Amino acid sequence: MDVFKQLAPFYWPKKKLLFVSILCLMIATALGLVYPNLLRILIDDVITEEKYEWVPWLAGTVVAVVSLKGTLQFLHGFFGGRLGNYTAYAMRNASYRKLQSLSYRYYDKARTGDLMSRLTADLEGVRQFVGFGFAQILNMVLMIVFGAAMMLSINWQLTLVCFIFIPVLGFVAIRFENKIHPAFREMRKTFSSLNTAVQENITGVRTVKSFAREPYEVDKFVDRNNAYKDNQILIANLWGNYFPVMEILASISVVILLGVGGTFVIQEKLTLGELVAFFSMIWYIIGPMWGLGFHINNYTQAKSSGERVLELLNSEEDIVNKPNAKKLDPELVKGHVQFEHVSFGYEGDQHAVHDVNIDAEAGKVIGLLGGTGAGKSTIIQLLMRAYDVQSGQVMLDGTDVRDIDITSLRRQIATVFQETFLFSSTIRNNIAYGRHDVTEDDIVRVAKLAKAHDFIMELPLGYDTIVGERGLGLSGGQKQRIAIARALLNDPKILILDDATSAVDMETEHEIQEGFKEVMRGRTVFIIAHRISSLREADEILVLDKGRVVQRGTHEQLTQVPGTYQDIYHIQYADYLEGKAGQQGNEVKV
Ligand SMILES: Nc1ncnc2c1ncn2[C@@H]1O[C@H](COP(=O)(O)OP(=O)(O)OP(=O)(O)O)[C@@H](O)[C@H]1O
């Protein structure tokens, strides 16, 4: 129950719903015991005694009891449903909020499918249990207690005889649970793997098709589908065996009741009405036994679902604000960035950047050049405090970024990433991204600066065009231009272009950079690029290799000295002079 104790903040505020729902169910269950007694009265006191004038009263009582029981069951469902939904609602919000606050490090390892299933299937499991499962387990116990008490009050010897087989029923139910539980767990796994196959196939459909790997994808899916089908058949077999066995055992109990109870009636130790009442009441015991496996299973499933949700909710946030974190005043931020002897590694001692020093005064443009995996993006991640440095320090206007409020820090930085992410919404919303305080003019202004305005206006719906998931329907260059417009709109003090113009041709890049000149003014800019053409204007270019700064200087200085920069310059400009430049394909990764 520890899991449900930890989940209490989500359902306890609505404890009234829980209590009312349980109370309604308890009264409904107790009312159920009125029927067998009415039957007993009908047989013993009305039919045997030939007091037929009582029949309408008995019938009226049955109608009243049925109506009351029905109403109470409705109220149980009504309040239980509200409770379950309220709980799931609160947990969903908390989980989503948590997802927003979890750091980059968490997402480095997280799997989308797994997170999705925690937020859907697992929450559903908890909702069902909190709303109904818990009350039903309690009800099961009450049925046994009420039923047994009533039976004992009528005839204790017969009650004990009837109960001989009940432990066997309980034993079979628990054994069943032990078998079905792993099968259900396996079902979750196979279903999740089936989902992952579909999700990855849809997300990566272009890769699948370009490699003509459809048959491989189909085979992969068939394999997983087979595993899912086998698991479902196993579950169906388990259920299939369970019911007849329980039916036989329950019938044996009933046969014993009829045999012994009938003998008692003949011996006049029991009235006929009492036997009939017993006959109804025994189902008060057998019924819960029948459902025992199901309820235990429900409980264990809800518990493991709750554990998975709690695991997410309790995940450690490694990048958090210090208690007295400094909130930046946008008006006062200058944008002076310093890296002092910064070293950092994602895992263990392996450094992704090593002893990096940068002094980017406000308004300067810093270029970062280096081969794949050289550590360029890592430097940017450290600046926006996606990760904390392992040694040295990163400072903004003389304050260590670890002492600055994270949100206010990131508000000063706008990044255009190598991979553009667009939301499935209109182009206008994608540029505004969550800001309601911007005018149409602002949006058009930044779109023009990013050289996106013209192609947007050529679309039939202009700024109202809905771009598909992740921007499908637009070219890579078009997506990037929208992302650039989005970054410019934020009016950041620090602008980061992480290979931002890699998907546009050199001519457009030149145009965008011309536009940038205006917006770069008064901002500190970091440009990560593989093309020297993107960096020519930088005040300082850092050439990185395996996380270390191997060269630094302006374009003019670096082209004069032998080294990596000069080599790249020769390669790229040789291409350019031969007339191959200007195409996206001439980009040389160094
Ligand atoms: N999230 C991560 N988890 C673990 N290692 C990472 C992570 N991101 C980057 N690395 C590793 O850190 C090193 C530096 O990577 P980084 O992304 O900074 O390089 P880069 O210069 O930006 O490369 P590219 O030009 O290919 O984007 C690489 O060895 C890379 O494998």
Image: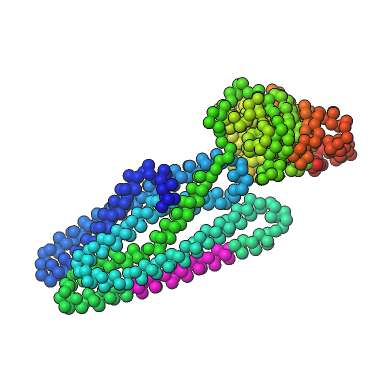
> With 363 as the anchor, is 588 left or right in this view?
right
Nearest the viewer among 355 and 468 is 355
Q: Is residue 101 above or below residue 525?
A: below
Does residue 304 lie above or below 177 as drawn? above
Can residue 30 be spotted in the picture?
yes
Picture quarter with the C terminus: top right
Residue 300 quadrant:
bottom left
In the figure, 393 relative to 212: above or below? above
Q: Quadrant of residue 576?
A: top right
Please report the residue visible at 45 percent of the width from the left and 65 percent of the height from the top.
178
Visible residue check, residue 481: no
Looking at the picture, does residue 43 appear above or below residue 583? below
Indicate whether residue 234 is drawn in magenta. yes
On whether residue 467 falls in the magenta region, the answer is no
What's drawn in magenta, residue-wise?
225-251
Residue 535 x/y as whole percent: 78, 32
Q: Residue at x 34, y 63 (%)?
A: 288
